Amino acid sequence: MTQLLSRRHMIALGAAFAAKPAFAVSEGAARQLVEGLVSEVNTVIASGASEGQILARFESIFDRYADVDTIAAYVLGVERRRASARQLANWTRAYKTYVARKYGRRFREFIGGEIAVVTTRGLPRGVEVETSVALRNQSPFRVDFHIEDSRGRPLFFNVVIEGVNMLLSERAEVLAQLDARGGDIDRLIAEL
């Protein structure tokens, strides 16, 4: 049953991405997007602002650099089919704030670290920008950003950290949270 469910999720994902028009994104534009993202994140981290201010800035950064609609729809999985337009809009807003807070709290670990673009390469749909992240007293690790242009400008839709696909991890977590709430999307939105 789990394999069948996973297959259904993959088919739904393929259909969702296939249905969207995609514009070509160059490797240069993808690199520029990631460099801008890294620069803004570093500025916020070094700002000395309060945690509340930092989290609000991260939400703004996430909104500008990520394809939030695609990410939010993907992590909701096939459950988005039974959601109303109002629920989907509320879900996207709640998920954006949730992700900004969840990952924004972790960015303090980056103080004194460096993120450098290593290379770019074309994907079947978009561009992958490989970066190397060096934190204080830790070995460097790889973080890849997947960029596409389905909204008229380059945006990232996935991040892979040392081989861990965040889009898939987030989907598993969100679906588990939804299951724990008896499939009640409105309850999940309220609790996020």
Image (spheres, rainbow, N blue to C red):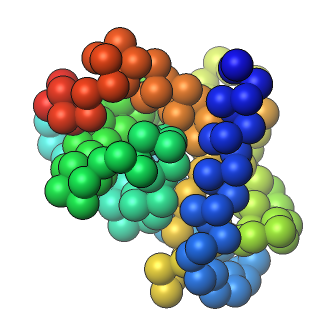
- Lateral position of residue 91 relative to residue 179, left or right: left
- Lateral position of residue 91 relative to residue 4, left or right: left
Residue at image coords 68%, 82%: 25
Residue 39, how many percent across, how many down? 47, 60
- Lateral position of residue 167 relative to residue 122, left or right: left
Where's the C terminus, which quadrant? top left
Residue at image coords 58%, 62%: 16
Residue 166, how many percent across, how many down? 60, 37
The image quadrant that residue 19 belongs to is bottom right
Image vertical order of residue 25 relative to residue 132, above or below: below
Image vertical order of residue 155 relative to residue 21, above or below: above
Q: 153 and 34: which one is in front?
A: 153
Q: 24 and 110: which one is in front?
A: 24
Report if residue 121 is visible in the image.
Answer: yes
Marker count (numbered): 0
Residue 161, how many percent across, how many down? 68, 35
Where's the N terminus, which quadrant? top right
The image quadrant that residue 48 belongs to is top left
Residue 53, how many percent across, how many down? 16, 43
Report if residue 66 is visible in the image.
Answer: no
Q: 93 and 154: which one is in front?
A: 93
Residue at image coords 62%, 36%: 168
Residue at image coords 76%, 54%: 130
Q: Residue furthest top?
A: 180
